[in-house]
Image (cartoon, helix red, strand yellow):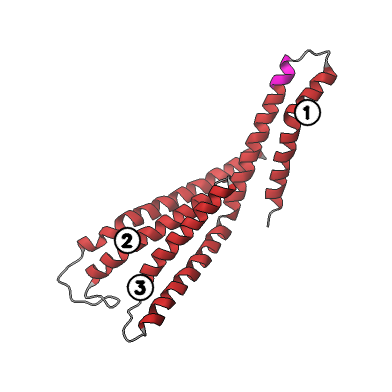
Amino acid sequence: MTKKIFNIQTTGSKLLVLIILIGAVIGFTAPFIHIFLDKKSEVEVFGYYNARMFFYAIGVPITLFISSVATYFSSLFIHIALFRKIMIFISFMLMSISIYYITWSLWARNDFDEFYYYTSIIILSLLISYLFILFIKRTTKNAVRLSNIARNIKVLQDDSKRISDIASIMPAKEETITYKALIDITGEDINVTIQEIVNEINKD
């Protein structure tokens, strides 16, 4: 079972690494795409004079958006609750800002009232960020669960090895003392780890 879990985790990790690398390439190149476009073009794009100006405006927000997604995804694998919540909050803020500027780049104001225009963009950016974070959390649930199970199984393996090491140095005739020593040192930790694995398996 342990081997199967690690094999599944390895396969999933390879796919995630590929997606992250593709996202990194897009994020790195987005701010520079405009350099390769014709600055003399007069073909209007999303209200901009030409494609070069449009990609100049939207390039950095795209990079910021990809960075926020990577930050949130990474935060799901942080096991310290306080740090995980801080990183989730930071990623949500970064994502909201990036979506705000992406929307601003795509949505020409024209005759729309200025106050309602910017208010709508703010609300839309917060809503899309929240929905996108829910989507990432939902689609990566199994990967996070397998990661937690694999980590806890590794802890059990370490505890088992510790028991074997202690047993090997204890006198064979002191069976009662040996057993008590093993339970005192590792019993509680093992029960906690087993409960964590059960919780991960039964989690919705």
Asked whether residue 77 appears in the rendered view, the answer is no
The residue to which callout 3 is attached is: 104
**Where is residue 76 shown, x and y percent of the image?**
55, 51
Disc 2 is placed on an element classified as helix
Q: Real-space Cα distance between discs 2 and 3?
A: 13 Å
**199 relative position to 92: left or right:** right
Horizontal side of residue 66 vs 158, given as left or right: left
The residue depicted at 72 percent of the width and 14 percent of the height is: 169
The amino acid pointed to by label 1 is: Ile
**Segment tinted magenta in the rendering:** 165-169
Amino acid type assigned to the residue bearing label 2 in the image: Val
- Residue 194: horizontal and vertical position, in percent? 72, 40
Residue 63: assigned label = none
Mark earlier in primary sequence (1, 2): 2
Q: Which residue is mark 1?
A: 183
Q: Which mark is residue 60?
A: 2
